[in-house]
Image (tube, rainbow, N blue to C red):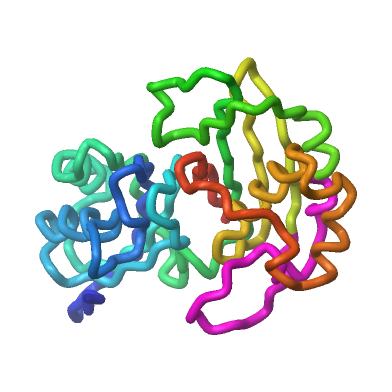
Amino acid sequence: MQHIFSCGNLRNLMITISYDGKDFHGWQIQKNGITVQEVFQNSLSKIVGEYYDLKGCSRTDSGVHADMYCIGVKIAHPIEPVRLKAALNRWLPQSVSCLDCRQVDDSFHARYDCKSKQYKYKIWNSDTRNPFLNGYALFYPYKLDAEVLNTAAQDFVGRHDFTSFCTLDKREMGDMCRDVKHFEVEREGNLVTMTVEADGFLYNMVRIMVGTLLEIAQGKISPDAIPDIILKRDRSYAGATAQACGLYLNKVNY
């Protein structure tokens, strides 16, 4: 339930957290499982009470992690930001950490003022599983050529209609165009990391991009097919949706 803030001298705070999403059903409160928003609000309420207005910078799906997630909170409580950060880290579970808390302009909105977001997708590319990356990287035992995939990924860069790379659900349809500013595929040992930055992302967009690149690696999709898939605006032409475990919201730019 959305908290309604009380009358008084409201301050607008930007709170930055990171979280291990392995055991959460995403950010937004759900009826069927525990979410990051739920545990955050429970912790915040212990400190400032029940009266505040909270906005997150983005939705993240079940199993998705965040190195940087920004929350806008309007409160009337007089607690100083540095003390609120410390108090949150006392009450939050071990899987969530408050990185920063600071006062911002009254007009700041964590979602709508965001200029771009950067996601990383991590793949453990080896014929042997890494037990320490279970839930934190996709285990992919077949050889990946990071240079070939990096070349193919450049076709995502630019402003395009990404309908082909979106899972359609009951959410209201709107502008399906997004401006992808950067896409890089790089290898360090057995770890292949795909990094993509855009002014915004559609539902499952990054995971479908990754799944498409993996099907290029498998020879199911041609390395030069991405521009044509974009033009078709048809989800059935793109690759499968990659598992959530390897996805991280890495950076939010304002």
Image location of residue 69, percent across then percent down: 43, 50
Is residue 188 left or right of 177 when viewed as pictured?
A: left
Residue ID at (46%, 67%): 108
Is 50 in front, or is 24? 24
Is residue 165 left or right of 44 when viewed as pictured?
A: right
Q: Quadrant of residue 96?
A: top left
Residue 51's place in the image compared with 192, above or below, is: below
Q: Is residue 165 magenta?
A: yes
Q: Is residue 11 visible?
A: no
Image location of residue 62, percent across then percent down: 38, 54
Q: Is residue 171 magenta?
A: yes
Residue 203's place in the image compared with 246, above or below, is: below
Is 146 in front, or is 57? 146
Q: Quadrant of residue 165?
A: bottom right
Residue ID at (77%, 28%): 145
Image location of residue 129, percent across then percent down: 47, 22
Image location of residue 157, percent across then percent down: 80, 53
The C terminus lies in quadrant: bottom right
Q: Is residue 70 visible?
A: yes
Is residue 123 left or right of 94 when viewed as pictured?
A: right
Q: Quadrant of residue 201?
A: bottom right
Residue 231's place in the image compared with 27, above or below, is: below
Residue ID at (64%, 48%): 211
Is 66 in front, or is 237? 237
Q: Residues in magenta?
A: 153-179
The N terminus lies in quadrant: bottom left
Is residue 235 left or right of 169 when viewed as pictured?
A: right
